[in-house]
Amino acid sequence: MQVEIWSDVACPWCAVGKRRFEAALRTFEHADDVALRWRSFELDPSAPRGHDGEGDVDYVGRLSAKYGTDRASAQGMIDRMTATAAEDGWRFRFDRIRPGNTFDAHRLVHLAADRDRQDQVKERFLAGYLEEGAPIGEPATLQALAVEAGLDDAEVADVLASDRYAEAVRADERRARELGISGVPFFVIDRRYGVSGAQPAAALVQALEQAWADRSTLTVVGAPPPGHDHGAGDACADGSCAV
């Protein structure tokens, strides 16, 4: 069963959603049969690659401006988010966060998928941005974090110096628009079920179980009405064929 998660590495709720999905898998009976794929979503495609100094660290001010509220209210939002994340094992430091464009980070997450290190790289980028204040848009930062997560240093450098995986990122974003995804995290199970937001682990388990149960059902197209054999297509069954 395939689970795709659209998210951004500069997204606090995406980090919380990752932890809750991991918790859900720990209690899901068929976890070994789940293939996870992280998909790209940029919350702010217009963000600059780098940052312009210490002023960028003022997350309270940026949040206040975004939602048109005062600094005290913005700080309250941050405090609640920090406390929620702590329940799932994250130690967010909004006082350290430095904004940056995440397009190159998404390209490296695609590289990581090809090298079977996608979850590790995704985790490292989230922790770097949300806990350590790493400037996630800067190539040198991405290089260091990706190598720490197990990618080859030379290959990471090659990706960052080229446009490799750029189309893969754009394809993910086009697919998100087609699916009507406007916020992240967004979980898509077998391209049939969608779960929006960082839902509790119990809700994610329920979605996984429903999707798994529906995998075993089959709708037969063109079958005759009950009690009528005529009109059925010719077929072999029970080790023999009527010819």
Image: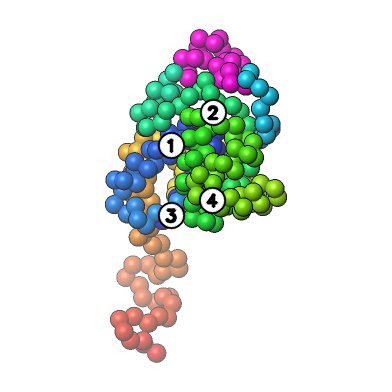
Drawn side of residue 135 relative to residue 27, left or right: right
Residue stretch rendered in magenta on the structure: 56-78
Q: CA distance from mark 3 to mark 1?
A: 17 Å
Task: State the mark number for residue 58.
Answer: none
Looking at the rendered structure, the secondary structure element under dot 2 is loop
Residue 195 x/y as whole percent: 44, 41
Q: CA distance from mark 3 to mark 4?
A: 20 Å
Closest to the camera, between mark 1 and mark 2, is 2
Q: Which residue is mark 4?
A: 151
Instruction: Indicate the amino acid at tag 2.
Output: Gly
Q: Which residue is mark 3?
A: 35
Q: Which residue is mark 1?
A: 17
In the rendered image of this protein, does residue 103 appear above or below residue 57?
below
Comparing 1 with 211, the one in front is 1
Determine the residue positioned at 54% across, 11% down: 71
Comparing 205 with 14, the one in front is 14
Drawn side of residue 8 relative to residue 230, left or right: right
- Most common SS among magenta residues: helix
Q: Earlier in the sequence, mark 3 or mark 4?
A: 3
Looking at the rendered structure, the secondary structure element under dot 3 is strand
Dot 3 alpha-carbon crowd within 10 angstroms: few under 14, some 14 to 19, many 20 or more: few
